[in-house]
C-alpha cells in the first residue's frame, strides 16, 4: 500500500449532513476492524454497516485507506502528544506509563488499528507525524541523529504496543511501560548509555 495518510485525507467537512455521514462511516470501519483485518474489509461492507449507499462512500472518501486516515489520525496525534515528551522528560518512565495507560484505556481501537493491513499504514503515519513534532527540538543524544531516533523510537513503540494488545488482558499497562521504557525510551534519553559505559569499563 503506497502513500501516507496525509495524502489520503480530505479536509474536515463543515456541512452537518456530511459530518454525520462521515461519523457513521468511521464507526462502521471501527466496527469491522474488530471483526477482521483491514485487508479483508471492502467498501461495500463499510457502506452496508454504516447504512449508507455505496455511492455515498465515494462522496466522502476515494479509498478505504482514506477512511482509515480519518479514523487513525486523531488517535495518533493524541498518542504522540504523550510519546514525544518521553524523549525529553525529567521522569521518562512516568511519561511512558502515561502512554501505555492511554492505549490501555482505548484498547479496542488500538487493537484494531495495529492489526492486519492497517498496521503498516498506521506505523507510517505515526512516524510522519512524529517527525513534524520534533522540529526545533534538540537531539536526544549526541551520538544519535534526531530523525533516526524518531524512526526507531516510534517504530519500536508501535511494535511493542501491538505485541501487548495481541496478548489480550494478560499484561498490565504498568508491565508494558516497564518493557517499553527499558528497551526503547531509556536508551534514547541516555539512561541506557550509562549502563553500557559501565559494562565496557568492567571488561
Image (cartoon, rainbow, N blue to C red):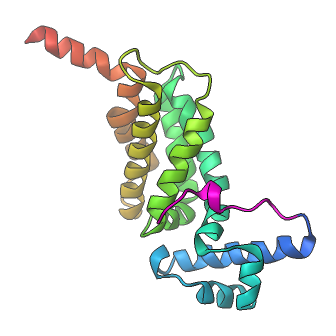
Residue 93 image point, x, y percent:
46, 30
- Decide whether residue 9 is among the magenta residues: yes
Q: Is residue 179 left or right of residue 76?
A: left
Looking at the image, residue 152 lies above or below residue 137: below
Instruction: Give whichever of 154, 89 is nearer the camera.
Output: 154
Instruction: Give whichever of 19, 110 is nearer the camera.
Output: 19
Instruction: Give whichever of 41, 65 is nearer the camera.
Output: 65
Q: Is residue 51 visible?
A: no
- Report the residue at 61% width, 59% height from top: 72
Q: Which residues are magenta?
A: 1-13
Residue 33 image point, x, y percent:
53, 75
Looking at the image, residue 59 lies above or below residue 76: below
- Specify the farthest residue to the top: 201
Residue 61 image point, x, y percent:
70, 73
Q: Quadrant of the C terminus?
A: top left
Q: Is residue 91 visible?
A: yes
Q: Is residue 175 left or right of residue 43?
A: left
Amino acid at each position: 500500500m503506497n502513500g501516507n495518510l496525509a495524502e489520503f485525507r480530505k479536509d474536515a467537512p463543515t456541512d452537518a449532513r456530511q459530518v454525520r455521514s462521515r461519523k457513521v462511516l468511521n464507526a462502521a470501519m471501527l466496527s469491522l476492524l474488530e471483526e477482521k483485518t483491514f485487508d479483508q474489509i471492502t467498501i461495500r461492507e463499510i457502506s452496508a454497516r454504516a447504512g449508507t449507499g455505496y455511492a455515498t462512500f465515494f462522496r466522502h472518501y476515494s479509498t478505504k485507506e482514506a477512511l482509515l486516515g480519518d479514523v487513525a489520525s486523531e488517535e495518533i496525534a493524541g498518542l504522540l502528544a504523550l510519546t514525544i515528551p518521553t524523549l525529553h522528560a525529567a521522569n521518562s518512565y512516568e511519561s511512558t506509563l502515561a502512554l501505555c495507560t492511554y492505549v490501555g484505556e482505548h484498547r479496542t481501537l488500538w487493537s484494531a488499528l495495529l492489526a492486519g493491513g492497517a498496521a503498516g499504514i498506521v506505523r507510517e503515519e505515526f512516524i510522519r507525524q512524529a517527525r513534524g513534532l520534533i522540529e526545533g527540538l534538540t537531539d536526544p543524544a549526541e551520538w544519535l541523529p534526531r530523525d533516526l531516533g524518531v524512526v526507531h523510537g516510534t517504530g519500536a513503540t508501535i511494535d511493542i504496543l501491538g505485541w501487548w494488545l495481541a496478548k489480550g488482558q494478560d499484561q498490565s499497562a504498568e508491565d508494558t511501560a516497564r518493557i517499553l521504557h527499558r528497551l526503547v525510551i531509556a536508551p534514547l534519553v541516555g539512561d541506557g548509555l550509562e549502563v553500557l559505559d559501565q559494562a565496557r569499563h568492567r571488561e
